[in-house]
Structure formats: C-alpha cells, structure tokens
Amino acid sequence: MDVNILSYVKPELLVVIFVLWGLGLMIKASKIENRFIPIWLCMISLAVALIWVYATTEITTSQQLAMAIFTAIVQGVIIWLIAWLTYDKFIKSGLSLNNSGKG
C-alpha cells in the first residue's frame, strides 16, 4: 500500500512547509537551544493551520467546532512532520551551514 502523506494536506497549506524551513533557519541562528526548535515549529504550524481552518470553515455547532479543531491539529502536525522530515534534504540540496551549525 503506497500512501502519500501530502494527500492529507490541503494544498493551500503546503506553502507553510517552506515557511517552516525558513523559520527553522532563523531560529537556529538565534540563541534558542536546538532542542526547542521542533517545539517552536510545531506550535507555529498548529497556529497557522488553526487560523486557516477558522478562516475557511463555517462553524455554527459545537460538533463543527470540534471537527475544525481536530482538522487544524491534524493539518498542523502533518505539515510540521513533512517540514521536519524534508529539512535535511533541503539543507543538503545546496544551502550550507557554517561550522557552528548556525545558518
């Protein structure tokens, strides 16, 4: 069974993957410890997904609200996971870091 994880992401949210790469590089260049970078990026992707779902969904019942929250969490985590798993490929494709690991 061949499952493409991108098929579970709304096309409008795919651009967030590239934004997370850029934000990850900016955070890496800051004084924030590297172990906290994935947490920050996950929170950012969840926030963006929540804003997008809220802006594109009509919510009139508590069931629709629960579904919107669930959708935002799933979309945000998938986007973060794709960005995290493809980051190394992105770096190796031509973007180099200096010896200290900072961008």
Image (cartoon, helix red, strand yellow):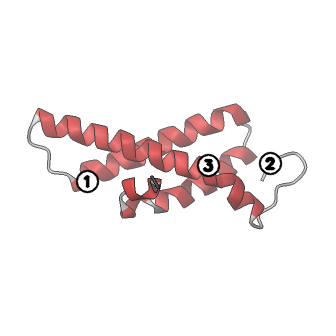
Rendered position, 47 above or below 17: above
Instruction: Estimate the x, y position of residue 32 in percent, counting from the top left.
Output: 70, 36
Ranked by sequence position, the earlier of labels 1 and 3 is 1
Q: Is residue 60 visible?
A: yes
Circle 3: element type? helix
Please rate how many residues cluster around mark 1, counting C-alpha atoms within 10 Å: few if below 14, some from 14 to 19, many from 20.
few
Is 78 on the left-hand or right-hand side of 82?
Answer: left
Residue type beneath disc 2:
Lys
Picture disc at residue 102: 2
Looking at the rendered structure, the secondary structure element under dot 2 is loop
**Relative depth, front residue between 33 and 77:** 77
**Is 62 placed left or right of 68 in the picture?**
left
Number of callouts = 3
**Residue in the image at 25% along x and 53% along y:** 55
- Residue 57 place in picture, x, y as percent: 20, 52
Residue tagged by mark 3?
85
- The extreme left residue here reads 60
Three-letter amino acid code of the residue under disc 3: Leu
- Distance CA(mark 1)–CA(mark 3): 28 Å
Pair 3/2: label in front: 3
Q: Which mark is residue 55?
A: 1
Amino acid under disc 1: Ala
Q: Nearer the viewer, mark 1 or mark 3?
A: 3
